[in-house]
Amino acid sequence: MTTRIDIRFAELAKQGRSAFVTYVMAGDPDLTTSLDIVKALPKAGADVIELGIPFTDPMADGPSIQAAGLRALKAGMTLKKTLELVRDFRKDDNVTPLVLMGYYNPIYIYGVDKFLTDAKTAGVDGLIIVDLPPEEDDELCIPALKAGLNFIRLATPTTDDKRLPAVLANTSGFVYYVSIAGITGAAAADANVVGEAVARIKRHTRLPICVGFGIRTPEAARAIAEKADGSVVGTALVDALKNSLDAEGRATAKTVNAVAELTAALAQGVKGAQQAAE
Amino acid sequence: MNIAKPNSYRSGPDDRGHFGNFGGRFVAETLMPLILDLEKAYTAAKADPAFQAEMNGYLKNYVGRPSPLYFAERLTEHLGGAKIYLKREELNHTGSHKVNNVLGQIMLARRMGKKRIIAETGAGQHGVATATLCARFGLECVVYMGAVDVERQQPNVIRMEMLGAKVMPVQSGTRTLKDAMNEALRDWVTNVHNTFYCIGTVAGPHPYPTLVRDFQSIIGNETKTQMQEIEGRLPDSLVACIGGGSNAMGLFHPFLDDPSVEIFGVEAAGHGLTQLHAASIAGGRPGVLHGNRTYLLMDADGQIQDAHSISAGLDYPGIGPEHSWLHEVGRVNYLSATDDEALAAFQLLSRLEGIIPALEPAHAIAKVMELAPKRAKDHLMVVNLSGRGDKDVPQVGDILRGKSK
């Protein structure tokens, strides 16, 4: 099985460049604006798109992404509409990898088999489900792999060498290394410490390693890009979006550009990085 | 789903933490290694006679166990049916059953070398018990409590602070117990290296539902012995209120394989089951939240819905996974009581027995008021009086004065 994710990372490896992965919340602040934002991301330099599935109780997310999810839900976002958003995005873009990221309950309630069929049809390439560790692989991971979707696992500073093989066993697409023990939007990670962790994981897998949590600026993205196969930025983009909204939390004429401009600046940071020797 | 009758109702969970289709370990990877460590530490502690001996010492001399099994004579006369016994968990140190579990977990935390304890609390009873034992053992204590609950349970907030705990009002979501649990999980993910999460109920990722049940089972085990001493036989029925369900599981579990014992759990029906309520089994369906699969209140998209109960301790949109399983296999009957029914029971017990119950067990008393008159006079009914009502006095006082105006 080769997904858009595999193709994209192979291309980037050829170019000797680290990937820039952007995270935004589906439906934030409303469905139409959100679609425009997602469409703008590849043009602004995003190599991979992570699209958050809104959930009422995102227990690994900090205040910014919690608020983004609640804005989306308040505007009527659902998992079904999230898949519609992906389908609409795919009308114009059949190459940029798109990964859905979220929590298991909305998928469980949608129905795993139906979800996987609909997600694949809509043009989703992979899934990152925060509350499904390898111990629960039968729930979604194994069925997703069978359906031809990548299941991207989170590895963390607490995942030691003994546990890594279990975490990596059914992982595909890339590995998402969570740079700090903490929630999204927390303190920045030290690039050197991250570099050591990436090297440690690389001893166990040939998959690309992307690093997220705590990366907010072009400089930080560049520092991480020198140590890893990709860097993920989420909270900073969500904050840029939020700062563009009006007093009632509605989109303004500035909203799409606010996200696109920061994406472009971060992408420049990543592209200026010297790729670490493999 | 397999809902065939098992040989024993007491053999769960399996080694992956499943009670039938419920339970499991639905947590972020950051927490998984710690949860596996906790499971190992608990298995080792259970096998260590010194652990049990130390626990027993504190249970007797610090908590004040065994708690009495008291014949509620005037309530029995008033209702005119079953003979009603109250399991007096409200007489424990800190005023509720919560201390049984907290003692066990704090002793585990000490074995694991953890110096910082976090907890979530709804009514504040679990927070107070955690703050108490942290004070006793010199541990740092941080308690997450929904901002709404901080308001309506002020006496317990003050108690926790006096005991040296830091109370963190949670402003996210519905600002009640569910959000306090989210925030505690966020703290745990961030401070996983030195922090032990002391969960207050039989929910959360495996092994929490099991270890909390085991620590609370002293309630049912004592009841069994005491009823044997008083009446020379098993009780005929058990009644307990359920938020997450720890006091109920503690009373029920030792009796699950005694088929003659009818068992009733009472959820909070709030304003009524067709309106805002907190009855996950009556009004919910299976989903995944806070580390386990269980009955939850949610919308068609799998978004968790706001619960409502007059009682902060029951104001939670889920229930422990073992209860969900006991519901599906039909061993326990799950009923519900509304805010108004609980308030009436609160007043009845206060006036007839001179015992002011917490609003949580007032829900159980409310169903006793329905069940007992329909039972014979030799029917022995045990109600878990899981907490005392001191914390609710200001809130109930306001409501009753408001109503009498």
Image: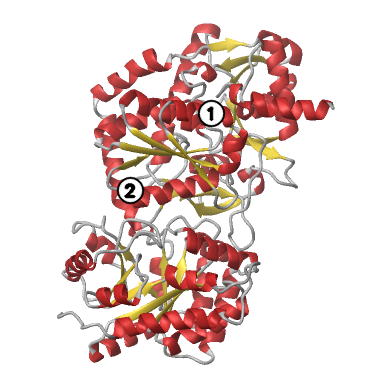
Where residue A170 appears, as percent x and y from the top left, is 31, 68
Where residue B250 appears, as percent x and y from the top left, is 48, 28
* Residue B12 in view here: no
Q: Which residue is mark 1?
A: B156
**A239 to B37, vertically: above or below:** below
Residue in front for this viewpoint, B57 or B177: B177
**B86 to A161, vertically: above or below:** above
Where residue B354 appears, as percent x and y from the top left, is 66, 11
Q: Is residue B52 left or right of residue B218?
A: left
Q: Which residue is mark 2?
A: B191
Q: Quick one: label 1, few (<14), some, or many (20+) residues within 10 Å? A: many
Which of the 4 image quarters holds residue B360?
top right
* Residue type, label 1: Asn
Pointer 2 and pointer 1 on the same chain: yes
**A43 to A206, vertically: above or below:** below
* Residue type, label 2: Asn
Q: Quick one: label 2, few (<14), some, or many (20+) residues within 10 Å? A: some
**A187 to B16, vertically: above or below:** below
Q: Looking at the image, which residue is at 30% across and 75% down?
A: A219
Mark 2 to mark 1: distance in Å? 26 Å
Quarter occupied by the C terminus of chain B: top right
